Structures are given as C-alpha cells and as structure tokens.
Amino acid sequence: MKKKPIVSSVSQTYGHKLPYVTRSICPECKRPIAATMYAKSGKVFLKRKCKEHGVFDEVYWDSAAEFERARKFANESTGISTHNVCFTNNNGSNCPFDCGLCTNHHNHTALANIAVTNRCDLSCWYCFFYAKEGDPIYEPSLEKIDEMLKNLRAQRPTPPNAIQFTGGEPTLRKDIIEILKLARKRGFEHVQLNTHGINLANTPGLAKKVEKAGVSTIYLSFDGVSAKTNPKNHYEIPRILNECRKAGIGIVLVPTLIKGINDHEIGAIIDFALNNIDVIRGVNFQPVSFVGRMPKSLRQKERITIPKATELIEKHSKGAIKQRDFFPVPCVSSITDFIETVTNREQYTMNIHFACGEATYLFLDDADKVVPLPEFFDVERFFNYLNAHTKNIESWKSKGISHAKYVELAKLLFEINSCIDRKKLPKGLDLSKLLFDVLIRHDYSTLGQFHHKSLFIGMMHFMDLYNYDQQRVERCDIHYAMPDGRIVPFCAFNVVPELYRDKIQRQFALPWNEWAKSNPRTDPSYKYKRDAAKLSSEQIYKKTYLHKKKFW
Amino acid sequence: MKAEKKASKKAVSSPQENTNQPRAPFEEVKFLHFSFSGIKTKEDVAYLQYKLLLIPEVLQAHIDFNSKKGTIIRLPYANFSTKLRELGIEPKYSLVEWVPYDEMMKRNFVCMKK
C-alpha cells in the first residue's frame, strides 16, 4: 500500500500550472511572505511584497517553456519517520526557521554534508565560508563526526548512503583519512570529498590514501579553463588530475556559473571534461547563488538559471548536446517507484523540486562523437512505460493478485528494447542488460560500468535570498548534519546562516588562540602561495590545457 | 563562486578572541512551554520565531500560530521575559523545566534514542 504523500499548506500548489502562490522570505528582513510564481516575457518570475521593504520581483527561471517541461516531473514524497527536532509542536509551519529535520520535511537525506573545518588555505574574495584571522575555528572532533554519521544513518525509512565532507578546505585536517574511513565504517557506500584539490596535487600519495580510505569521488572546484575564470586552482588542475588518475579515483568538476564572468566557457568546460573522461566522471554546474544583499542591477547582470545554462550548452556544443537532453532530477522517481512497487521495499528517492536540478549523460562513440543518452534512448517513453506498469502492478496488488507483476515485468523487458535506437547506441554499452539488472534483478553493480563509460552533466541551482521558494526547501534532499544533532537542508543552512551554519559553528568552535595552542604544529593563518610561472611551464600543464582535442 | 563584490577585509594584525558566543557543551538548558495570544498572522509568528532564534542563547524554538503555543530551549539569560515582551510575546508559561544538555541533544540525535 503506498503511503500518503506529504502536502503542506504551502505545497498544495506544487506542480501546478503558472501562475501559482508559494511562500518566500523578504531578502532584507527574512520575514516569511506569500509569493507568486508567474510567467512574463517567456521567463518565470518570483514576486513578493514585504510590508516594510517593498516589492521584490526576481527571475526564477530564464525559460517558461522549459519550466513547463520540467513541471511534468513534479512528484510527491512520503517523508521520513525519524525527525531530529521533535519537541512540542515543531511541525515545520515556520519553515525555514524550524529545521531540522521537522515533521513536515518531504524527503530523506539523499546526499549528506558534513563541514569538517572552517579553515582554508585560500582567500577567495567571494567566499564567506572560511575563518578569517582571529575568527573562532570550527573543527568537530572525530567522535562528534562519528556521532553525526551515525545520526544520518539512523534515518528511516531510507538512510542516506552518500556523504560529502566539506569545509573550509577539508584536506587541511591532519586526520582527514580517519574521517573518510569513518564514513565507510558507518555504512556510507558513496563518499565524496569537496576540495579545491591543491593539497592532492602537492602532497605525493595523498590522493591514493584518500582512495584507499574509501572516497568514491573528488568533488572539485573548477570555475573555468583559463586562469582568469578559475583563479582558484587553474595552475594545479593538471597535477590534481594526474594524482587522481594514478590513485584510480574519479573527479566531478564543480563550476559555479556567473553570467558575464565564466558562462562563455560552459562549452569549453565540458570539452575539457571529455578530454579527460578517463578520470573525470562528471561536471556539476552550479548557477550562482548570491550571498547577502546585492543590488538588482548587479543580480540582473550576473544571474543565470538552469534553462539559460542548458541553452548555452546547446549553442556552444553546436547542437551536439541539446537542451531537451536534460531532465529534472525527480524524473528518476519513475524508476524508484517501479522498483518499490515490485519489491515492496522503500527505495532511495530523489524527489526534489523539479526546478532544483537537471542532468544528462554523454557518451563518446567510436569516432569520438558526443552522443547524449536521450539520442539513443527514448527517456520519456521509457518513463511513461514504467509509470504505466507501476500503476498496473499496484492495481493488481490491490485486488490481491500480486503475481501479475511478472506479466508486467515481461512486457517491460520488451518495451525497453523498443526505446533503444541501436544504430546510435555507443559500442560496448549493453543498455538492455543494465536496465534489466537494475529493474528486474535489483543489481546496481553494473551502474559502475555505466558511469565509467559516460560523462554526467548536471545542473544544481542552490537558492539565495532573492529566489527563495519554500516549496523547494521542503523537498530538499541535500542536507547538512550539525553537531547538535539536527539535520538541515542545504538552502536553509546556507541562506539563513545566522540560524544554522554560522550559529552552530560559533557554538562548537574554539577561539582562535585556544585552537592555535592546542595545535602547536599548525599555523591557522597559513595561506597557500603558488609559483604560477613554474606551474605553467610544466609539461603536464601544456598537455592538459594546450594539446587537446576539440569535440565541437 | 558567490559574486558579492565587496573587497575582503584585511586580516587583523593580532588575533582577537570572540568572547560573546555561548560555547558548547553546556550543562543545562531551559525548556519553556507557553501559550500566547494577540499575534495576528502565521507570517508574523514565523518572523517572531526568527528574531528569537537570532539570540545566541536561544538554541531552538517553535511558536505555533494554530495552537497558539510555543516552546523555547535556551541557555541562562537574564530577564528573558523582558526580552520576549520586547519582541511582542506575552507568554503564559505552562511548564518551565531545566533539562541536562545531554538530554536535549538526545532528542535531536535519532541514533541515541532507544
């Protein structure tokens, strides 16, 4: 029997056609206020009025047509049964000030985050996440991190199996290897390290240690292919890639996209990833989210949203990758709902808001031509088949005829083949077998082969004060574990930091001097200095940036 | 990359300690359960909760518009009732209890519950 989905008062309009009412906060005072999502001039806007600070009318999505296409994948979730704030009456009615997780939260944690330090050896001008000199140092102990990991894994019905360690710069911690091993020990199957990568480049053997400790993926900051667009680690990238290659560890590049700053390199970034497909597993673009107050003129100049980014990808790739090749993240619920119905077991879901993120997969054929997954696999038709069979099986089950699912499974196998265009299917990819293993045998080991032969291209647009939509926060499945036992959605943790990130880190931090005294061999004020001339003269630099194939 | 174009502040020449923040672990926390009246809208209640949570000594809080009840978990704070009145809450306390901090933490840590 399917559980009843959660529908909060704010979320009653979720998935509705435009215009509809949702709830947001005032960017000036943070007062929760009703907001209207509407279309104008081909775009989608979020408009609201604060009685004190006036009207805010912000671009939410650059394309109303793409919003309409994504809206089809809106799906409801059934929530979690373990809540971390369950003292009297905390029903999430004051979202986003009730985190977390409250009884109103729609989704389990799909990707957990733990900030292991607020120290960083870079001083990027745009970053507010690191401790400046004199600030308290936040570094939870191994025991506290273990507590947070256990807390995450105690979530029911579906605990998270993916964890990302972040900061500051997590590789500054001398015990980072022990931390990574703890995650595996607690049952996380997928461990990510969010890093600028410079220490992996400059510390021989560290990448191998990280791999041996159980890290599946390096989540690597990468804002462009030039030193101008990627001042953070442009010169170290060649060494980082090399170290990860030697260690056998995959990388996901994470560019933050800003209009007018690095969006002109969106095609070049994918091109770069394809040139290094042996070590780069994916590119996860993050359209910029603004920190703090920002004048409208500057936001208009620099704001870029998911549909604009996918439009640029189509343009820069000369049509090799089309905008329609991208699908919203919750589309995978067709797969998980089907498996759940067949197995009668709660499945890992990713039923986030359809406007939060999109993705596709790219393959290279024998002639090194880029082939997106939807070019040889009719994704929408496949989802429609799955949805129909899920409905049929549930209908049979309600009549007490559970074995009818085998008839539905047999039909599905035939239909899977009809979704595949074998003329365009990349050689060596047995998509039928892969889908059979996942859907029928529930064997996910072959997914590793899929990822090995493909490049994931994702878009994840985290919110800021100006485009804040409570319907998205309620559905968020990327959560931070906090040392006080709470688990908080990403866009509450970082957009209302005065209640979550900054407040909790101050509570659990040591004063600068005290931390320095207890770590006498570490200078907390240390900042990395590079010799750019030397790094750019190295053979590996030239090979990485200059001598490469163009895919379009 | 966040694009707020403020210049970074220069590093302070000598590190200064921040002594104003309450630091965990704490010994005890106070649970205040109360009812209230007079607040007109759900949004006003939510905003009030936000302002309460800005107080460093307030660890958690929930004020419910529908039931007109609230719970605050806080550290020792002189004249807290005065602070509540400044924020526009005239609480009628139904229960006030001191709870060991560890006990409060267990309520948040699912893995510690039996």
Image (cartoon, coloured by chain):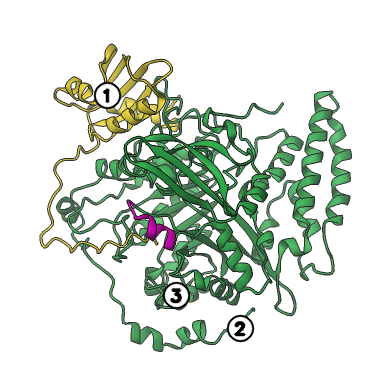
Q: Residue at x 42, y 53 (%)?
A: A165
Q: Residue at x 46, y 30 (%)?
A: A102
| Amino acid marked by disc 2 | Lys
Residue wearing tag 3? A237
Q: Are marks 2 and 1 on the same chain?
A: no
**In the picture provided, is A159 more to the left or to the right than A400?**
left
Residue wearing tag 2? A549
| Amino acid marked by disc 3 | Ile
- What color was chain B assigned in the picture? yellow
Query: Is residue B2 visible in this depiction of the protein?
Result: no
- Distance from the alpha carbon under mark 2 to that under mark 1: 63 Å
User: Which chain's colour is green?
Assistant: A
Instruction: Look at the numbered disc 3 and give the secondary structure of its residue.
Output: helix
Between residue A384 and residue A133, name the one nearer to us: A384
Image position, residue A188 (x, y; %): 52, 47
Query: Is residue A182 visible in this depiction of the protein?
Result: yes
The single residue placed furthest to the front in the displayed view is A41
Which quadrant would residue A81 be assigned to in this image?
Answer: top right
In the rendered image, residue A165 lying in the magenta stretch gets the answer no
Which quadrant would residue B60 be assigned to in this image?
Answer: top left
- Distance from the alpha carbon under mark 1 to that under mark 3: 49 Å
Q: Are marks 1 and 3 on the same chain?
A: no
Image position, residue A517 (x, y; %): 15, 54
Q: Residue at x 63, y 35 (%)?
A: A76
Residue wearing tag 1? B100
